Image: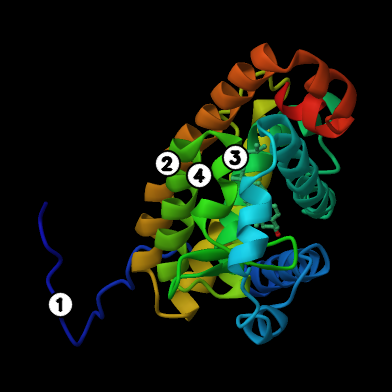
Amino acid sequence: EPREQSSHLIPPLPPAYPYSVEPELQEELSASIVRSHRETTQYRPEELQALRWKVFSREEIHAYQSKSVDEMWQHCAVRLTDAVQYVVEFAKRIPGFRQLCQNDQIALLKSGSMEVVLVRMSRMFNTENNTVFFDGKFAGTELFKSLACGDLIAAVFDFAHNLCALRLTEQQMAVFTALVLLNADRPCLEDRDRVQRARRDLELALNHILHRDNQESLLHKLYQRVPVLKSLCALHIEKLRWFRQLYPLTVHSLFPPLYKELFG
Ligand code: CLR
C-alpha cells in the first residue's frame, strides 16, 4: 500500500475515522446505550470491586460439587436465564432494536443473548484468582465440576479472563454488546437491511468512543473475540443436547421456559 506523504501545508488525514455522522449524534447514541447498559446490569463496577473479598469456602465449594449433575444443571440454567433476562431488557432499549419486527428481535436474541452474557461475564471476573461472581460470591472453575462439562467451563473462563485483560470501560462494553446483538449475519432474519442500518450507527459510535479514548487498537482486539464467542455458544448448545438426552424430564419440567425457548 502506498504511504501518504506527510506535509505541514496539507496535514495528513486523521486515521481512518468516519466523520460522516455528526459527532453530537454519536455521543447521544452512545450515552443512551451506556444508560441502558447501566440500568440492565445487576452490579455496578464499584459494587463488584467492593465484593472481591467474598469467595466461596472449601465447604461451600464441596456442597456445589456434591450436587447431582441434573441438580447443578438446573441451578446454573436458572442463574443463566436470570442473566439473559437482563440482556433482553438491554436489547429492548437499544435504539433501532424495538423498531425491528418481532421475528427479527427474537432471532437476534436467540443467537446473541448468550454471547452478551459471556461478554458481560468479564465484568464479574477477577483475573487475580480466576473467579467469577456467581451466586453471591466469587467462584473458580472447580465449583462447576458437577456440571460434567469441564471443557466448556474452562473455555468460558478463559474467554472472560482474556476479555477482562482488555480493561474495557463501561461505555466501550455497552456499545460492543449492542453490536454483538445487532448482527445482520444471524440466521432467520427477515429484514437484514434494517438490522444493518441500526448496526452501522453503532459501529460509528464505537469508532468514535475508541478514537476519543485513544484506544483504536481495541477495535481489532474486540472483533477478534467474535468467532470465539460463537464457538462457545455452539459448545453450550452441544452440551445442552447431551444433557437433554440423559435427563429429558429435568429439561422438560424444571428448566426455565425462556432458557428452553432460546437454546432448546
Ligand atoms: C454472567 C454475567 C451476569 C451474571 C452471571 C450469571 C450466571 C453465570 C454467568 C454470569 C456466566 C456464565 C455462567 C452463569 C451460570 C452458569 C454459566 C457461569 C456471571 C456457566 C458458563 C455454565 C453454563 C452451562 C449451564 C447452562 C449448565 O451478569
- Which residue corresponds to mark 2? 228
SS category of the residue bearing label 1: loop
**Residue beneath the point at 46% across and 33% down:** 231
Point out the tag, 1 or 4, that comes first from the N-terminus: 1
The residue drawn where x is 73% and y is 64% is 33
Q: CA distance from mark 4 to mark 2?
A: 14 Å
Secondary structure found at label 3? helix
**Distance between the alpha carbons at the discs numbered 1 and 4:** 50 Å
For the residues labelled 4 and 3, the Cα–Cα distance comes to: 11 Å
Question: What amino acid does circle 3 point to?
Answer: Ser
Q: Which residue is mark 1?
A: 6
Q: Judge from the rendering whether residue 85 lies leftward or rightward of residue 47; answer left or right.
A: right
Query: What residue is disc 3 on?
Result: 146
- The disc, 4 or 2, on the residue closer to the chain's N-terminal end is 4
Q: Position of residue 103 (x, y in %)?
A: 82, 24
Q: Position of residue 97 (x, y in %)?
A: 79, 44
Residue 153's disc is: 4
* Mark 4 within 8 Å of ligand 1, using the beta carbon: yes
